[in-house]
Image: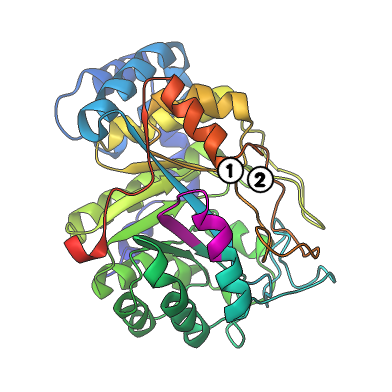
Amino acid sequence: MSFLPLFEQHSWEGMGQRIESMRAQDVERALEKRGRRDLNDFCALVSPAAVPYLEQMAQLSYRLTRKRFGNTTQLYIPMYLSNECHNICTYCGFSVHNKLQRRTLDRDQVMREVEAIKSHGFEHLLLVTGEAHRTVGVDYLEQALEWVRPHFANLSMEVQAMDQADYERLIGKGLNSVLLYQETYHRDNYGEYHPKGHKRNFVYRLETPDRLGRAGIHRIGLGTLLGLEDWRTDAAFVALHLGYLERTYWQTKYSISLPRLRPAAGVQSPNVEVTDRDFVQLICAYRIYSENVEISLSTRERPVFRDHLLKLGITSMSAGSKTEPGGYAIEEEALEQFEISDERSPEAVAAMIRSQGFEPVWKDWDSVLG
């Protein structure tokens, strides 16, 4: 079983036309619907016709989020293990064509990073690497999990797509979640952004969540890179993918991230503008479509904007992020994946969350309780 047959039933152009055809009555029907919304409802909620309804969408999104997640916001932090990469991706600072300093952390360096991160109280750690199968493949990742597992309650990864057997090995070492973004569901243009490397294989990447589901992962993260292609059409394909996964691997939890293309060394500028209003509409549409999906907000966004988004459907936020290997404890310069925008300390972000009547959660799940 695979998402591919369902994906192939929907063309990029057809999905875009479906969204553009939505009218006010379609938006109203989606907002008033009881029970699970379908893809047609989502297309209405991300359509231009929904813009006049943003206030209603925001209020509904707030109510649904509070009902399912309460007044809590989970805090997590990324640890970049390596910036080595064999791919050329036109939007990423780790791309192999950027001839800058590369680093893969050894055990001692990882433990220095762990010490720095733990000083802030984090229990949710996201491990990130470039895609270099020979140097940061499954063997290295298995070791890294062994190093950090005793120090954190929840471990996630954002690394290269892998086979089911590889994921099963990593789950056995304590891996809880995998975030793997399609970047764009525009199959014809996907190769333009990935001209070299394993990531160029569109279908292999598309079917990775299926391999994760069969491997029994606790949580799968989906998303696209906002700024590459039409955000509305890409979002509809994310919704299609999410709906399929929730039905097929119903014991797995799911999250959505909304990264906007950010400046980095040697990367392209956005092809498509995604305004703050667009961003708000997208968050609300995802929440109304799926009450159970976790929605994560990274430090790519401006501090004041992150503060205002908190109540709209966000369930987790990164804080104090560094996007280069060794960024927390090693002072030598290394290549960043992208520039962050919210440079506040974890303590400052936690204080902001409390000031809005929410509770920052450093630990809310432990694998021994699963």
318 vs 23, nearest the viewer: 318
Image quarter (top left, top right, bottom left or bottom right) of the N terminus? bottom left
- Estimate the x, y position of residue 180 in percent, counting from the top left: 46, 61
The colour scheme used here is rainbow
- Estimate the x, y position of residue 62 in percent, counting from the top left: 32, 22
Q: CA distance from mark 1 to mark 2?
A: 6 Å
- Residue topped by disc 1: 226
Residue 267 seen in the current view = yes
Q: Which mark is residue 216?
A: none
- Mark 1 or 2 closer to N-term? 1
Badge 2: few (under 14), some or many (20 or more) residues near its Cα, within 10 Å? many
Q: Amino acid at mark 2?
A: Leu
Left or right, residue 42 beside residue 200: left
Point 18% across, 61% down: residue: 369
**Furthest residue toward left:** 35
Badge 1: few (under 14), some or many (20 or more) residues near its Cα, within 10 Å? many
- Estimate the x, y position of residue 267 in percent, counting from the top left: 77, 55
The answer to whether mark 1 and mark 2 are in CB contact below 8 A is yes
Residue 63 versus residue 322 in the image, above or below:
above
Point 72% across, 47% down: residue: 339
- Residue topped by disc 2: 261
278 vs 176, nearest the viewer: 176
Point 82% across, 58% down: residue: 266
- The image quadrant that residue 14 belongs to is top left
Q: Amino acid at mark 1?
A: Leu
Point 49% across, 28% down: residue: 351
Left or right, residue 29 beside residue 191: left
Residue 21 seen in the current view = no
Which stretch is magenta? 114-126
Q: Secondary structure at mark 1?
A: loop
